[in-house]
Amino acid sequence: MRHSGLFVLDAVINLVLGILLIVFPSRLVSVLGVPSAEVAFYPSLLGAVLFGIGIALIIEWMRGSSGLGLAGAISINLCAGLVLAVWLMFGRLHLPVRGMVFLWVLVFVLVGVSTLELLATVRGTAAQQAHRAGRQKLE
């Protein structure tokens, strides 16, 4: 999958989760079976952050950028996925099965997308270096 496809995939995931958390924070928390907050402030704030990340990724994709945008997406997804995994393993969360399943699927999606993005970045860097080395030999 190319960088642009990864940007769009990552942006869609963030935008959808962000919109759902902004519009239906309490209901979404209940449906997914994840830990609830006393008020909807924190879930909706998280939704706003995710939505903002999605917008930033779309902007970077539209600009054709492959700079900080993808590196930022990798770091955000890895941090979120790994912190969530730590919570699920050691946080003693008392969640219904559907909540645990949803959160573990989210961990795998976040870490999986990050892995694809990281591999694409490494391959792109290696290809650029090989291209430069080939040009230098010709000169």
Image (tube, rainbow, N blue to C red):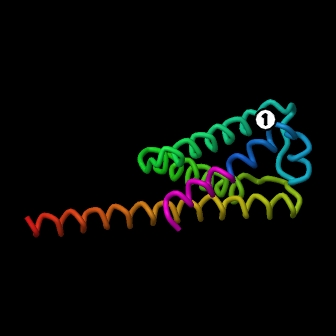
Secondary structure beneath label 1? helix
Residue that lies at the very extreme toward the left in this rendered image: 139
Residue kind at label 1, given as amino acid type: Ser
- Sort mark 1 into few (<14), some (14-19) or many (20+) by Cα contacts within 10 Å: many
Q: Who's the residue at 87% across and 62% down the image?
A: 98
Q: Reply above or below: 47 against 6.
A: above
Q: Reply above or below: 133 against 83.
A: below
Residue position marked by numbered label 1 in the rendering: 44
What percent of the width, then of the height, locates residue 33?
A: 87, 53
Q: Nearer the viewer, residue 127 or 114?
A: 127
Q: Nearer the viewer, residue 113 or 90?
A: 113
Q: Who's the residue at 80% across and 64% down the image?
A: 101
- Is residue 104 highlighted in magenta? no
Q: The magenta stretch spans which residues?
A: 1-12
What percent of the width, then of the height, locates residue 128?
A: 29, 62
Q: Who's the residue at 68% across and 48% down the image?
A: 14
Q: Nearer the viewer, residue 5 or 27?
A: 5
